[in-house]
Amino acid sequence: MTETEEVFTAIAVVLSFAAAASYINHRYLHLPATIALMAVSLILSSVIVVLGTAHVIDQESTREFVESLHFDEVLLHGLLAYLLFAGALHINLDALRGVLVQTATLATFSVVASGAIAGTAFWGVATLLGFEVDLVHGLLFGALIAPTDPVAVLGILKRAGAPKSLETTMAGESLFNDGIGVVVFLTIASIAFAGGEPALSEVGGFLLLEAGGGAILGLGLGWIAYLLMRSIDDYSVEVLLSLAMVSGGYALATALHLSGPIVVVVAGIIIGNQARSSAMSATTRQYLDNFWELLDDILNAVLFALVGLEIVAVQLDWQYAVAGLLAIPIVLAARLISVAVPGATFHVVGLLPFQRNVLAALTWGGLRGGISIALALSLPASPERDLLVTAAYFVVTFAVLVQGLTFGRLIKRLFPGEVAQTHE
């Protein structure tokens, strides 16, 4: 089989897997798409693992096939750009300005603080369990698990019925914190595996360049696309312009060593607000929305099918499983602290009121998803990598299946009056 045939076969298998899971959910389960796809994929993958363990099928061949999918590259350098843009299209700029302080704090301070707390605690637990890991590997876990996942968060928010300000805050945080989280992750990874020791000033400069440069590039690309769309009235060309902007913008950001996620998010907010209101006809708006909504649904299905398939690459002996289970409360506690501290500080200085129901929603709704697994899988082969991949998989599985499934009910209990108004 040639390389091209292997790629086509892999695409066919993943799409068939995603389609089967989507059909089962729509026909029988009626769950939110992200949760159902994750659950069905996990079940089917678990059956494959059991059959492989019983030597009914060749487990090694199955593992090699899953590894050949290169999930980390497919997500970080493929699916992510389109998923982020699709989410950013529906962010209301005026609403985002109203929660700018909360969103900026969650996307910066909370990401770093959560990663440091979770990483240090996880290192202590792993050491007690007998794993020979350094503190830097614990911090590496904290860095990859700290950012909330935009795909998971936006998928749950669509059905949760949260108050608009909370929904905008959570959506904005999940869209913007990936750029910060990835930079922190890459910096710690260079220390852990490449022997580098960058100074704090270098890390800060690198972060400013990646995030700030990405925002400027996204602003420029979004504005150019807006001007081009304003000069014509042809929905097929305008949809193609948006698609080219996302693909080309992410590729250009990668070549310039800027944050690709921030580029497409900023560009998406411009297209979703400025271009939508003054550069598009009603027909173009309808086609643009329908195109990106359909693409978002398809890519979501593919992403969570891939996440489910990756269980084949997870170490499932008892030590790894215990470490993964203990990582769940560690990550939740780190999230709670990283959100509560700035919230209480803002309350004391009179900037923003401290609301316990908002704190509870932000903590439980801070879902982790495929990005965390992709970052873990991108690490070089080592015993530490196996531990981090397994722990990340346990946290993500719990976040999507348990937190995601109960988040809507939590919102209804925390904001009964506001949720009722939202649905009217």
Image (cartoon, helix red, strand yellow):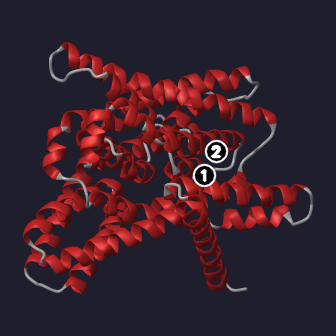
- List x then y, in percent, for residue 197: 47, 34
- List x then y, in percent, for residue 348: 21, 13
Q: Residues under labels 2 and 1: Cα distance?
A: 6 Å
Left or right placement of residue 339 versus residue 289 in this view: right
Q: Judging from the image, what secondary structure is the residue with disc 2 in?
A: helix
Q: How many marks?
A: 2
Q: Residue furthest right?
A: 55
Discs 2, 1 touching: Cβ within 8 Å: yes
Please say if 381 is above or below 309: above
Q: Residue at point 29% right, 60% down?
A: 264
Q: Callout 2, which amino acid? A: Val
Query: Is residue 199 visible from the viewing direction of this image?
Result: no
Location of the N terminus by quadrant is bottom right
- Sooner in the amino-acid sequence: mark 2 or mark 1: 1
- In the depicted view, which residue is nearer to us: 27 or 102? 27
Which of the 4 image quadrants contains residue 415?
A: top left
Identify the mark at residue 389; answer none if there is no mark. Answer: 2
Q: What residue sits right under mark 1 in the picture?
A: 377
